[in-house]
Amino acid sequence: MSQEELFMDSVTAGKLTEKRSRSNLGLAVTGLLGGSLVALYAVAAPFVAPALRKVCLPFVPATTAQVENVLGVLRARTGRLVDIGSGDGRIVIAAAKHGFKASGFELNPWLVWYSRYKALREGVQHSTSFHISDLWKVSFAQYSNVVIFGVPQMMDQLEVKLASELPSTAKVVACRFPFPTWVPECTAGEGIDTVWVYDAKTFKTDMQNGMTRKRTPEPEDKPDSHTLM
């Protein structure tokens, strides 16, 4: 074989090797990208899934003002506190720092585990508890302070549930959306940071008497407001 033929063969072999290398690199990149997307879905799915349920209760963190408003209206209160749909645990942890024995109920296990980690990091693990549970399958009879970040679709049913379970000494704090027929004893904040405070003695008496109330108007969103939780 001539030197020219040997040279051509070596060039052809080199091109084939380069082509195979590029092909292998492409497969590796594709595999890495695919694996990353799968991992991203695995992490994000539990956070997005609540929005796909019949009653949408998506997770969006509470604002600092919302947390402060909740603690402000409960500053003179004692007893056990529960946050229904506790998300990342910030209400429960903040309440524990203010002396409450606080619990959170959340259907998303990732958020519950994260809340427990945060409570441990903040040093309030002994005065907090977080539970993976559907709120409709839990009794809130043992709590005298209830916080709820709900959505309009669930508030009618929740009125009935809380009125039948809570002691008459309880206070209920609704954030973002008020209860449709209960009359609040006071409010705090404005816009999406508004909280409504309800006295259990009042709404339990109204339920027993079969009374209905005019729906509480919802706050108007301001152009510069933060995203709802």
Image (spheres, rainbow, N blue to C red):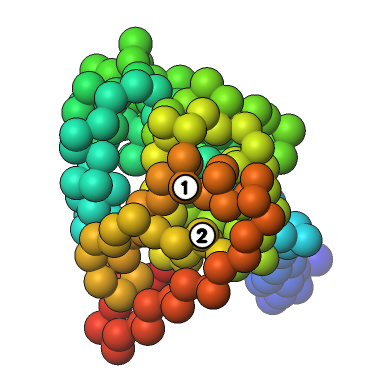
- Residue 228 can be seen, yes or no: yes
Say if 60 sits above or below 99 in the image: below
Question: Is 67 left, or right, of 184 in this rendering?
Answer: left
What residue is drawn where x is 65% and y is 37%?
Answer: 164
- Residue density around tag 2, few if under 14, some if 14–19, many if 20 or more, within 10 Å: many
Say if 76 sits above or below 102 in the image: below
- Residue density around tag 1, few if under 14, some if 14–19, many if 20 or more, within 10 Å: some
- Camera-nearest residue between 81 and 51: 81
Q: Secondary structure at mark 1?
A: helix
- Residue 32 can be seen, yes or no: no
Residue 85 x/y as whole percent: 53, 44
> Label 1 belongs to which residue?
202
- Camera-nearest residue between 58 and 216: 216
User: Dots 1 and 2: beta carbons under 8 Å?
Assistant: yes
Q: For the residues marked 1 and 2, what is the alpha-carbon distance in whole angstroms?
A: 9 Å
What residue is drawn where x is 51% and y is 59%?
Answer: 182
> Label 2 belongs to which residue?
182
Say if 106 sits above or below 27 in the image: above
Q: Indicate which disc residue 103 carries.
A: none
Quadrant of the drawing holding the C terminus? bottom left
For this orientation, the residue located farthest to the top is 126
Q: Tag 2 or tag 1, which sits nearer the N-term?
A: 2
- Camera-nearest residue between 88 and 75: 75
What residue is drawn where x is 67% and y is 30%?
Answer: 138
Q: Secondary structure at mark 2?
A: loop
- Camera-nearest residue between 99 and 124: 99
Residue 10 x/y as whole percent: 68, 65
Residue 74 x/y as whole percent: 26, 40
Q: Amino acid at mark 1?
A: Thr
